[in-house]
Amino acid sequence: GQNNRIFKMPKYRTMRIDTPDIATHLMSNPKFYLSPLGGILRSYSLDELPQLFSVLKGDMSFVGPRPALHNQDDLIALRSKKGINKLVPGITGWAQVNGRDSISIQKKVIFEKYYIDNKSFFLDVKILVFTIIKVFFRTDVNH
């Protein structure tokens, strides 16, 4: 979360209980661990809906960098170096609408740095509109 604070973020379970505790992008075959409905929930981003509670609680906003997992040390370090960790994390962000799961962590941080340098109401609206389009057409989703 903001300032690298760990917080609980509700999410629908899409992976089996025996899934290793590592980031999905580090798994050799993440599809192997998907639950029967996990692929559908992930492809339409329905697993993110419970995060609206985090927005109401103040731990998240609608737009901002996606929260890092507790074990994503590389992402946390890069974000801290660029000052991105000072932002409240979001349900969607500039990196999500510019590649989502299909871009590297380094590229995500570049997009997040752009967001922090250009943050505005209009950029947030643009990100929300692009998010709706990406979710509707299920682009850039690895499930």
Image (tube, helix red, strand yellow):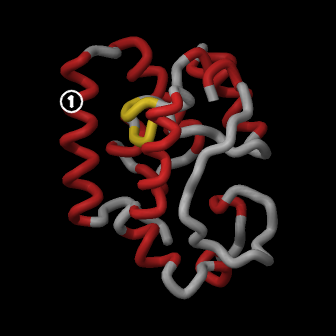
Note whether 12 is above or below 19 in the view shown: above
Give percent across and percent down for residue 75.
67, 36
23 w.r.t. 56: above or below: below
Q: Which residue is mark 1?
A: 125
Taking 3 as reference, is 47 left or right? left
| Rendered location of residue 17, percent (x, y) | 75, 75
Q: Position of residue 54 (x, y in %)?
A: 52, 38
**Corner quadrant of residue 135:** bottom left
Residue at 48%, 55% in the rendered image: 101
Q: Residue sitting at 49 percent across and 47 percent down?
A: 51
Is residue 48 found left or right of 68 in the rendered image?
left
Q: Nearer the viewer, residue 31 or 125?
A: 125
**Figure disc tally:** 1
Extreme-bottom residue of the structure: 36
Identify the image quadrant of the N terminus: top right
Residue located at (43% from left, 30% from top): 61
Q: Is residue 61 above or below residue 8?
A: above
Q: Is residue 53 left or right of residue 25?
A: left
As helix, strand or loop, the secondary structure at mark 1 comes to: helix
Number of residues whose C-alpha sits closer than 10 Å to that of mark 1, classed few (under 14), some (14–19) or many (20 or more) = few
| Residue type, mark 1 in image | Val
Q: Which image quadrant for residue 77? A: top right
Q: Position of residue 42 (x, y in %)?
A: 45, 67
Residue drawn at 64 percent across, 73 percent down: 15
